Amino acid sequence: MVCCSSYTKYILLFVLAIVVPIVSQANHKSHQVIDTGSACNILVWIPYWDQSSAFQSYIDNKEIINYVAFFWYTLDERGEIKKYSMADEDINLVRQAKKNGAKVLAIITNLPDDEVEDALDWDPKRLESILFNEKKRHSHIRQLVKLVKDSEFDGLDIDYENLPRSYKDKFTLFVRELSDALHEEELILAVAIHPKTSDRNPRENNGSWAQDWQELAKYADQLHMMTYGEHYPSSRPGPIASPQWVERVLKYAQRNKGIPNQKIFVGIPFYAEIWMHRKWGGYSGLNINLTYSDIMRLKSKYDGVEGWDKTHTSPFLKFTDNEKKSYTAWFENRESLKEKIDLIAGLGICNYAIWRVGGESKDFWPLFK
């Protein structure tokens, strides 16, 4: 989900450069799945590095939020589950969300802990021994179920990203077996899904080729479609999730893969991406996700000029800092989000997964009511 390759180190670098002055901050035994509740659902992801702000955003909008997922856990180089070193694993937040009527999920990722490791990007090697060794895979599944039960979660959000195509069959087997184990305990299984519009486009070889959507839909209760990241730091500048692109991804899921609408949770971006203009032309993306509030602060501090791309129905911001360095940021506002939500509703889907809350505009929320 999630959308970032490294958080704290890059955030610190960028904060020092720009933001500090403005931001203080095989047969499956049963194909039954867990009932995920009403026809329409909203899930929010809570990042550990901004947990207080994000959880407060949930509290402020708890009457319309059905699921809360905490970004607390990763795999080490041996494939063992561990808590992110900076994560505050507060079971009281889990209990509070459940008391408010939400279902609470634990997120487990293969994104290294950059506070204690040199690795900075999603690491598929951490899954290799798990997926290709039956004994290790079954042990991993037992540990995941134990984690969920011990910490009083309602289920698990598997966010294993950037896996190669050669992992596909084993990843499907893992999800199938994990589904059995969780469902025996009446626990929920969600899987984060890379966006794609085909199974052949090399530009979409971002981990999506390791995900057999049709098979995963048989076993997972929710498929969290990461319909954001259309443009990203190493790409050219552009919208995070234009409605046209989101529509192509969702139609591929519905029409080509036959995924039921009730299992599709459409990823909604509340974050921004920023690119610095190189002196001699071109761009250099900064590997940091800003919030809407950050963008508005940048606009105010540097007298930035906000624009609107009619083709992609997306806003952007241009500004120059005190060192005469120029930047372009693409973000989401109420108008761009409304375009996507109307489109999604037109496809018969009304489940949303928001990456991520904390720092968004308050006027985003009425769109979901």
Image: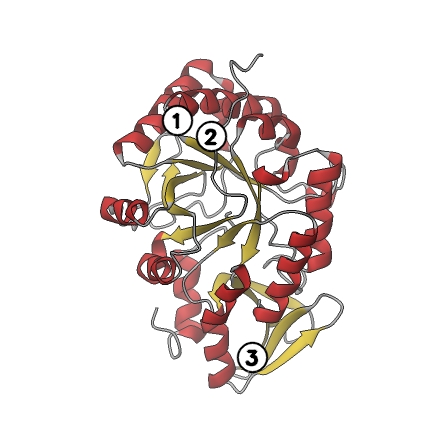
Label 1 sits on a secondary structure element that is: loop
Q: Earlier in the sequence, mark 1 or mark 2?
A: 2
Q: Is residue 275 visible?
A: no
**Which residue is rendered at x = 44% and y = 55% of the image?**
64
Q: Is residue 132 left or right of residue 51?
A: right
Give, as a three-letter code, the residue at label 3: Lys
Q: Are marks 1 and 2 in contact (CB under 8 Å)?
A: yes
Residue wearing tag 3: 325
Q: Is residue 67 left or right of residue 278?
A: left
Give, as a three-letter code, the residue at label 2: Ile
Closer to the camera in the image, 239 or 70: 70
Please provide percent x and percent y for residue 73: 36, 40
Residue wearing tag 1: 186
Instruction: Report the number of numbered marks.
Output: 3
Q: Is residue 361 left or right of residue 253?
A: left
Closer to the camera in the image, 206 or 278: 206
Marks 1 and 2, Cα distance to the nearest angstrom? 7 Å
Closer to the camera in the image, 272 or 156: 156
Q: Is residue 66 visible?
A: yes
Please provide percent x and percent y for residue 356: 46, 56
Please provide percent x and percent y for residue 261: 63, 40
**Which residue is rendered at x = 59% and y = 26% of the image?**
218
Q: Earlier in the sequence, mark 3 or mark 2?
A: 2
Please provide percent x and percent y for residue 194: 60, 42
Label 2 sits on a secondary structure element that is: loop
Q: Earlier in the sequence, mark 3 or mark 1?
A: 1
Residue wearing tag 2: 34
Crowding at label 2, few (<14), some or many (≥20) Cα neighbours within 10 Å?
some
Marks 3 and 2, Cα distance to the nearest angstrom? 52 Å
77 lies above or below 57? above
**Which residue is rendered at x = 73% and y = 57% of the image?**
244
